[in-house]
Amino acid sequence: MIQVIGLHKALGDENVLCGIDLVVPEGGTLVVLGRSGSGKSVLLKHLVGLFQPDAGRVLVNGEDISGLKERQLGPIRKRVGILFQSGALFDSMSVGENLAFPLRESGMLDPELIQERVAEALGMVDLAGEEDKMPENLSGGMRKRVGLARTLVSRPACILYDEPTTGLDPIATDSINRLIRRLQKRLKSTSVVVTHDMKTAFHTADRIAFLHEGRIYFEGTVEELRASEDPILVNFIEGRSGESD
Amino acid sequence: MFHVIFHAFGGIILRLLRYVGQLAFLAMETFESIRVAPLRWRLLLNQVAEIGFRSQLVVVVTGAFTGAVFTAQTYFQFHRLGMDSAVGAVVAVSMFRELGPVLTALMLSGRVGASIAAEIGTMKVTEQIEALRALGVHPIDYLIVPRVLALLISTPLLVAECIGLGIGAGYLVATKVLGVSRAYYMTNMLSFTTGRDIKMALIKGMAFAALIGFIACEEGLKTANGAAGVGRAPTQAVVIASLVILISNFFLSFFLNIFFPAGSY
C-alpha cells in the first residue's frame, strides 16, 4: 500500500503540490487525472523517491521514504517500478540488454535465467523476439512497451505509469490501455496511472483522483466521476476549455 | 555606479563559490561511492579504452610538434648567445614541469570532457538518469566513478607519453636539423632533469584529470532544456575545464615547487 500524507512541493518559485493526501490500496489501481503541468508526474515521482518532498510524508508498505538517502532508496525502488513518459530506454543498449540490466544489477548472474526472464517480460507486452532491436529503431508505442517490460522484469509489487499513452495514436493507445488492464489482472500488482487521457482513465481505474491547483480536487470511483456535475470536472471530462472562438 | 560594479562583482564571486561547492559535493559523493559501492570493472575498462587509449593520437601529435617547435625557438634564441647545448635541458624541464601536463590536460578537456558532458547531458534530458535511479542504481556509481577513475588512471600515462614524444621530437630537431651536438645535448638534458620533475608532471596530471572529470560530469548532470541544453553542456565543460586547468596550473606550479624544486641541486 502507498500512502501520501500532506505532501508539499515547490519547483523554483511555483508551488506545484500544496498538501496532497492520498491512499493507493494494495492490489488496486488509482488513476491520477489532471491538466498538463498540474503536477501529476511530480506526485508520481515522489512515490518512488525520485523527488523529495518539501513537507509531508510518503509511506510505501508503512515505511516512510521521504528523507531517505539515494542509497537507502535502492531496495524500495526494486519493489516499486515506474514506466516513464518517454520509456527512458538506455539508448546505448539493445532491447534485450535494457531488460537484462535491472536483473544483472540486482545480482542475477546466470545468463540462461536472465534470457528466460527477458523473454517472459517481452512476451507480456507482446514483443516476443525483439531482443536484438535498438531503441532508435522502435516506434513510440513499442518504446513504451519495452519500458514497461523493463519495469515488469524485476516483478515489482507496485507499478507506476507516467502518461503511458501520451503521444500515441488511438490504436496504440487502446493497445496500451488493454495491456495495463491485462497486467493488472495477471500480476495483481498495485498500480498508479498518471494521465490526462480520459479513455485511459476509464479503462484502467478502480479509483480516480483529480489533481487541480496543487490539491486533490476529487477522489472517487469511475461512476462517481461520471456522475459529477462539478463544472471543473465536467469541463475536463468533456475536454472543454471554456474559451469562445 | 560603484554600487552596480560592486553588485556585479559580488554576483560573479557568489556564482563561482556555488560552482566550487557543487564540484566539491560531486567529488565527495564520488569518493564515498568508491568507498562503499562495488566497482564496475567492465565499465571502468571501457572508459580507460575510450578516454586513455583513444586519446593517444591527439596527445602524441600535440606533444611531438610542441616539443619540436619549442626546441627550434629555444635554439634560435640560445644560438645567438652561444648556448646551443643548453637547449635540451630547457626543453626537457619545460616539457616535464609545464607543457606536458598542461597540453595533455587541454587536449583531454576538449576530446574527453566534451564527450562526457554530452553523453551524461543526453542521458539527463531523456530521463535515462532518472531511469537508472528508478531501477535502484546510483548514477554516481554507474556513470561518474568509472569516468573519473579512468581519467585518473589514463591521464598520467598520457602526460608521460606527451613528454616522451616532445623530448624525443626536440632531440631529433636539435641534433638532426639544427646541428646541436648530441653528446652536449644529452648530457645537459640529463644533468638538469631530475626525478622531482617527473613527480611534478605526474601529480599535475592527476590533479588535472580530477578537474576535467568532475567539471565534465557536473556539466552533464546539470543539463536541462532539451537539445539546446545538450549543445551547451560540452561547450561549457571545455571552456570551464580549460580555464581552470590554466589558472590552477599557475598555483600548482608555485605550490609543487616547494616540495619538488627545479634544478639539479
Image: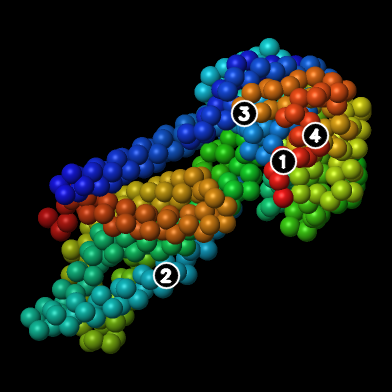
Mark pair 1, 4: CA separation: 11 Å
| Chain to which the residue tagged by mark 2 belongs | B
Q: Of the numbered discs in the image, which one, if any, rests on residue A213?
A: 3
The reply to whether the C-beta atoms of the residues labelled 1 and 3 are less than 8 Å apart is no
View extreme (top): residue: A62
| Chain to which the residue tagged by mark 3 belongs | A
* Quadrant of the rendered image containing residue A104: top right
B131 left or right of B47 in image:
right
Q: Which is more toward the observer, B119 or B202?
A: B119
At label 2, which amino acid type do we have?
Val
Identify the residue position indicated by label 1 in the image.
A241
Residue B181's place in the image compared with A215, above or below, is below
* Residue at disc 2, secondary structure: helix
Q: Which is more toward the observer, B10 or B259?
A: B10
At label 4, which amino acid type do we have?
Ile
Label 3 neighbourhood size at 10 Å, few (<14), some (14-19), many (20+)? Answer: some
Q: Of the numbered discs in the image, which one, if any, rests on residue A105?
A: none
The reply to whether the C-beta atoms of the residues labelled 2 and 3 are less than 8 Å apart is no
Tell me what residue is drawn at x 38 percent, y 58 percent.
Answer: B239
* Quadrant of the rendered image containing residue B163: bottom left
Give how far across and how far down residue B214 sits, in percent: 43, 46
Q: Which is more toward the observer, A150 or A196?
A: A196
* Residue at disc 4, secondary structure: helix
Identify the residue position indicated by label 2 in the image.
B60
Identify the residue position indicated by label 4 in the image.
A237
A84 left or right of B55 in image:
right
Q: Are marks 2 and 4 on the same chain?
A: no
| Chain to which the residue tagged by mark 4 belongs | A
Mark pair 2, 3: CA separation: 60 Å
